[in-house]
Amino acid sequence: MQWSRAPPVPGPRRRRHGYAEGVPASPRPQVSRRHGRRRLRRGAAAAGTVLAALLAGGYTAAVVLTPAPAPALEASGDARRTFQADPAPAQAAVDAQTLPTAAGWLDGEEVWVNAGAPGAEDPQPIASITKLVTALVTLEQQPLAPGSEGATHLWSEADLARSAAFLAEDGVAFPIPAGTAVTARQMLTLALIPSANDFAAAYALSVFGDDARFAAAAADWAERHGLGSLTVVEPTGMDERNVASAADVLRIARLALRDPVIAEIVRQPSAELPWGIGVVESTNPLFGVLPGVRGVKTGRTSAAGYNLVAAQAADAGGREAVQLAVTLGRPSEESRLASSLDVLGALRTAPRRVSLVTEGERLGTAVTADGARVPLIAAEAASAVLLPGEAAERVAELAPPQPGTAGAAAGVLRLDSPAGRQTVRIVTAEPLAEPDLWWRLTHPGGAFDLP
């Protein structure tokens, strides 16, 4: 019996992609390539918008949080300036005199002379003004501390002989016994107050030994101090070869008053000495006539006439100024006194108060980053008293002001004069404002202070 294989029953066939053959597949969406690209572009745009928003927000925050650049500072053309006192009043004080005359002040180095007067610039016999040179030269060789007595000199027979000789020549002398101990201060006091020739000579010779050595030391001292007209051959002034110009006499007086020992002695109208000498009076005729007399020295011989270099402290607008007057070759004591009073009186009106800055004066400008210009001004006025020939200087030191109301600190103005240093505040004249947000957003270089 043959068996026959039944024909296979048709069934679902599997397709290559996993779907059964003969079974309908679910419809698959059909997306075109163009539509896909559009979707990608829209996504990118949205992402860019988000990124831009994030970036913009960060930039704005950075602009808001970053401090504005400090304003630039511009100094005015005269923020640095020098002021010079007028010398005309001092020159007028001496030009009114017809004989050799000089004037000046202890402070400073200027000297005014009446150059048109005969012999005003030539060396003149200075007589006992020589004793200022003697004191300065000897103190340089053997210094004396203020208040101390210094070295002791035993009065010798030679000193006694000189005392007698000076008296015979119409000089000033105070004989004391040989063997008397005399200090350096006592010899200086007698030489400078009553103008004792014997004590001036004893003082110099106790240090230098003889006139030749003293004269050599005086010549060296004069050269070092620029006193070209000064010649000194002995320490008293009795020799007519002791000469100097009026201008150099004033310079000698300055040096003497700057020495504390000499200045202390010559400002005394009198002094009391031992050995029976008692009270001695200054030969300076201004004591008791003018207030504030500071010395300095007289001189008189037949060749020299009547000489005087005088110093007086006077008020100059609240500043004490020691004024100096030299009168040489006057024909009498009265003429010498009158000339000195005239010169000193004229000098009292010579100092001038000079305005160094006025309140509200513009000294500079603060320029903000957005170009706004704010004036920088002096907060107050300042002045100084200047003597003829003196100068004062001002210098502005600007500093960036803080934003805010007017009057913000913007530096200082330094004022220097012979009377001392002053400072004046510099402030803003108007409110200083920082650049607004819009300007900072649109000017990143300025907002971030970029080059």
Image: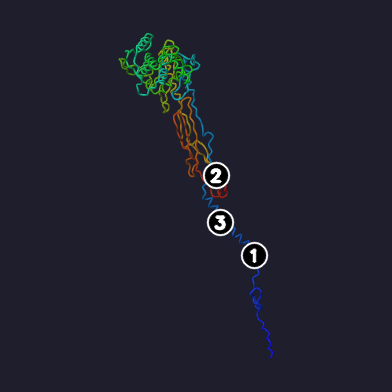
Q: Badge 3: few (under 14), some or many (20 or more) residues near its Cα, within 10 Å? A: few
Q: Residue at x 42, y 28 (%)?
A: 319
The answer to whether residue 449 is left or right of residue 260 is right
Q: Give the residue furthest to the top.
A: 168
Which residue bears the numbered disc 1? Answer: 36
Color theme of the render: rainbow
On residue 54, the disc is 3
Image quadrant containing the N terminus: bottom right
Question: Mark 3 falls on what kind of element?
Answer: helix
**Residue 162 position by quadrant:** top left
- For the residue pair 381 and 228, the one nearer the viewer reads as 228
Q: Badge 2: few (under 14), some or many (20 or more) residues near its Cα, within 10 Å? A: many
Which residue bears the numbered disc 2? Answer: 369
Question: Mark 2 falls on what kind of element?
Answer: loop
Up-down relation of residue 343 to residue 20 (above or below): above
Up-down relation of residue 443 to residue 53 (above or below): above
Amino acid beneath label 1: Gly
N-term-proximal mark, 1 vs 2: 1
N-term-proximal mark, 3 vs 1: 1
Up-down relation of residue 157 to residue 348 (above or below): above
Amino acid beneath label 2: Ala
The image shows residue 344 at horizontal and vertical percentages of: 43, 20
